[in-house]
Amino acid sequence: MRAQVQIIERDGQPEYAVVPIETYHRLLALAEDMEDIRAYDQAMAEIDRGEGEIVPADLAERLLTAETHPLRIWREYRGLTQQQLADAAGVGKSYISQIEASKKRPTVRVLQALSRTLAVDMEDLV
């Protein structure tokens, strides 16, 4: 990547580098690629340490499309009925049903219990 670069100095020291806009865009794209690689490496390291979880593509797609409440998606993925999840989290089955139907928003305490039971972050359930 050989580009025209203008160096601007202050007090005899280089302070700024001015590059053509296409070079800037190329550098920006490369920096974004490096961030993606770093995130991937971090995720793989977490999985190697037993801190992360690989989920099937169909589960990830369901979560991303947001057509179904994430609580229901994770509950079904973990193989739990609404009653089993409710019992484990210490809430009523109807409360789970209302959350999954987006008729109720869980409290932070309930979210904590649900996330613990499902072994996911609270953010994954909202």
Image (tube, rainbow, N blue to C red):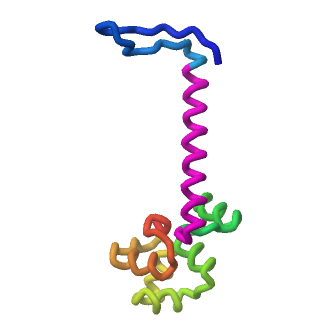
Query: In the image, 57: left or right of 81?
Result: right
Residue pictured at 50% horizontal, 86% vertical: 85
The image position of residue 17, as x and y in percent, is 45, 14
Whether 101 is among the magenta residues is no
Query: In the image, 6: left or right of 23?
Result: left
Query: In the image, 15: left or right of 78?
Result: left
* Res 3 → quadrant: top right
Residue pictured at 55% horizontal, 12% vertical: 20
Magenta region: 24-51
The image position of residue 123, as x and y in percent, is 45, 64
Q: Quadrant of the N terminus?
A: top right
Observer-nearest of 111 and 46 = 46
The image position of residue 104, as x and y in percent, is 41, 74
Farthest residue to the front: give it: 12
Farthest residue to the left: give it: 11
The image position of residue 115, as x and y in percent, is 45, 75
Residue pictured at 55% horizontal, 34% vertical: 31
* Res 4 → quadrant: top right
Task: State whether the magenta stretch is mostly helix, strand or loop.
Answer: helix
The vertical placement of 121 against 41, above or below, is below
Question: How many numbered discs, if any?
Answer: 0
Residue pictured at 70% horizontal, 63% vertical: 57
Whether 32 is among the magenta residues is yes
